[in-house]
Image (tube, coloured by chain):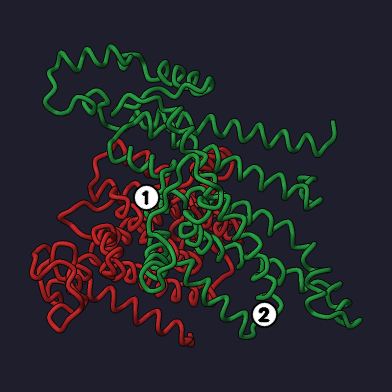
Amino acid sequence: MHPLLKLVIQRLALGFLLLLVVSAVIFLGVEALPGDTAQAILGQSATPQALANLREQMGLNDPPLTRYFDWLGGVMTGDLGKSLTNGADIAQAIGQRLGNTLFLAACAAVISVPLALILGLIAARYAGKWPDKVISAITLTTISLPEFVAAYFVIYLLTQVIPLFQPVAMVFPGMSFGAKLHAVALPVIVLVMVVLAHMMRMTRAAILNVMQSAYIETAELKGVRPMQIIWRHAFPNAIAPIVSVVVLNLAYLVVGVVVVEVVFGYNALGQFLVDHVTKRDLPVVQAVGLVFAGVYIMLNILADVIAIFANPRLRHPK
Amino acid sequence: MKLTLSATIGICLTALFVLSAIFAPWIAPYPLDLAVGGVWEDPSSQYWLGTDTIGRDILSRLIYGGQITIFVALASSLLAFSLGAFFGFLAAVKGGWTDQILSRIVDMMMAIPSLIVALVILSVLPLNLTVLIFVMGILDSTRVFRLARAVAMDIAVMDYVEAAKLRGEGQGWVIFREILPNALSPLVAEFGLRFIFAVLFISTLSFLGLGIQPPLADWGGMVKENKDGLIYGKAAALMPAAAIAALAISVNLVADWVLGRTTSLKGGRGG
């Protein structure tokens, strides 16, 4: 087998194993915590008989391992069970909302990645001079802000001071693509702010790191213009670390989305999760948690694989 | 050590926040939970930062809220620190199976975003200060573990550690008397970053309604209480938001300065 293919398959298998362990932690770990599902559904005033009946009906008397494998079998076949609070089918509810979450994250990614690369290049080109200092100061500020704080400053600025947008972002099936884009503009601006800083700082650092190589000095001495040096010589060699940081931040984006969705009342998976944590609806929380963990792990593996392709040195482990 | 301008600003602001948290009952002009004015009054000489969604003085609530925010963040980052540093040193000193098991557990914990894990756990456990501190502290200890293990790995091969082992000192002596003092400076810089992370974490949880519960107040919860005012042009929610940002930035400035003077090791913010 081609060695590269083997490495990629290894990573995928590792990721799958990790997801399995995570599913066990999400299910068994939570089971181990104090708390009674039957009590949670029926409330404090339930009679002991009613509790016993419900436990029997839900299979809560089976040993945890049996229930875990039942649950896992269900997850594999797309059956995530029913919500405790309204009895709705969880898989269906997640299906309706996952698309909206991914749409939001994708919009933010499409804007933030090129922007981060360009700003990173500029900061590296003018390292230590004023453009670099301005960019660094701004990114240091945005990196210190939690998503919801950044969100409310943006909301106040763009709906009150300069009224350009609506403070709520709703997306309905059947809305035109343009209307959807307009609806998510504010949350996307916030998400871009939050992930931009980290990506841009790493781009700058990676390029400055390469800039110390001997071949850069040679290029300088033969009179190549600075932007040309960065673009032709430094950037290709800095791609590996940059790509992995970009993908890691996309993974971070998937989580940042949870808070931003709550801020804007955006009807998607993150808000769904927070709602059901508040309602203590455990099956929903476990299922959505697993989906988020799955996407996060997948993106991390993608970062690994891209890094292996971009940097031949990683193909030969010591 | 020479102070830079940004470090001076950072230290002064951080000190201001900490002092006003400690002396909250003496400084705050009004009680925490008393409606003293109208709903969302604008800032005036009577209410310096205006009043909130049910007419409580925002400045007073900010001061008391800072107390809770700083206390919870400090407690959880101290916990993260003790756990992470202890197990990190242990993994580095013992090596072999101990190291393998601890490192794999940490890898696994870091494979899922902490916010998601916290939400799953908090859907089962009661929401009180102890639970919050423990959940946040344990989740965040993974980053300290990695740093502590990396630092201790470098120190564990030093001659003086070898000498201590040869003269027959126990595990505890090697960890606490040989490694700890030499690993302290990079860890102290890291502490600042962990503290910021904890502030952001507890604020986010409270904002989602899953952190500090009323009648206690913290900054994240205050943003949540007052967010609806923004639609009517009332800036009340921005005051606690600005407080979170100012605290995070000022501690960041101090940590950056300490970091710049000690080491290049850094844990990062992460999810």
Crowd class of label 1 (few under 14; some 14 to 19; many from 20; radius 10 Å): some
The quadrant the N terminus of chain A occupies is top right
In the image, is residue B156 above or below residue B235?
A: above
Camera-near label (1 vs 2) is: 1
Residue A12: x and y, percent?
67, 34
In the image, is residue A261 above or below residue B28?
A: above
Question: Which amino acid type is marked by label 2?
Answer: Ala
Which residue appears at 31% of the width and 38% of the height? B123
Instruction: Give the side of residue A65 with respect to residue A243, left or right.
Output: left
Residue A265 is labelled as 1
Q: Colour of chain A?
A: green
Crowd class of label 2 (few under 14; some 14 to 19; many from 20; radius 10 Å): some
Q: Which chain carries label 1?
A: A
Secondary structure under the numbered disc 2 in the rendered image: loop
Q: Chain B is drawn in which colour?
A: red
State the image quarter where residue A163 is shown.
bottom left
Which residue appears at 76% of the width and 49% of the height? A314
The residue under label 2 is A127
Secondary structure under the numbered disc 1 in the rendered image: loop
Residue B188: x and y, percent?
44, 67
